[in-house]
Image (cartoon, rainbow, N blue to C red):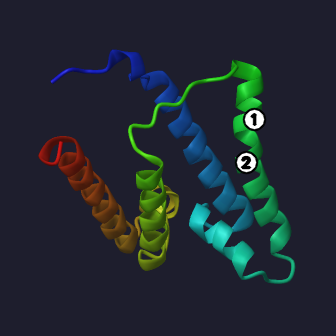
Amino acid sequence: MLIDWTHFTPWAALAGGVLLGLASALFVLLNGRILGISGIVGGLLRPRAGDMGWRLAFVLGMLVAPGLYWLVVGPTQPRIDATWGMVVIAGLLVGVGTRYGSGCTSGHGVCGLSRMSPRSLVATLTFMGAGFVTVFLIRHALA
């Protein structure tokens, strides 16, 4: 097995994990809500009075952040080993999965596990297992 040392970035991954954990903890402490992206975006589709401002600000921040990164670091060339069709199908499957799983990876994997939620543990094990099987099938069994 070869290790891709070019893309092995433990310090960047650690920093990202710490920032995500800190943001999740602050969000639940200050707002009393779970930092799950599908729930936040889903709330925009079913608006409630007084609930739209923070949701819009959150989504706007997610959309603006890559542009700010580009301004600071410069342009990067992403590499996606998939066709556009595969990307669209994957996105639709993730969307369906978040509906059936009552949440997304950030809601269950980060926030739910930190609250010791049994439902989130099952959800996280399920989506991680499905990801492992999918990668194995695509890269090894069907390649």
Q: Quadrant of the N terminus?
A: top left
72 is higher (above) or lower (below) than 108 = above
77 is higher (above) or lower (below) than 31 = above
Q: Secondary structure at mark 2?
A: helix
Which residue is rendered at x = 18% and y = 42% of the image? 143
The disc placed on residue 63 is: 2
Amino acid, disc 1: Gly
In this rendered view, identify the residue nearer to me: 114 or 119: 119
Q: In the image, residue 20 lies at what x, y percent?
A: 57, 45
Rate crowding at label 2 as few (under 14), some (14 to 19) or many (20 or more) other CA atoms within 10 Å.
few
Which residue is rendered at x = 44% and y = 54% of the image? 85
Q: In the image, residue 28 lies at what x, y percent?
A: 65, 62
Marks 2/1 in contact by CB < 8 Å: the verdict is yes
Amino acid, disc 2: Leu
Decide if residue 73 is on the left or right side of residue 100: right
User: How far apart are the alpha carbons under marks 2 and 1?
Assistant: 8 Å
Q: In the image, residue 140 lies at what x, y percent?
A: 15, 42
Residue with the mark numbered 1: 67
Decide if residue 101 is on the left or right side of residue 133: right
Displayed quadrant of residue 54:
bottom right
Which residue is rendered at x = 49% and y = 68% of the image? 95
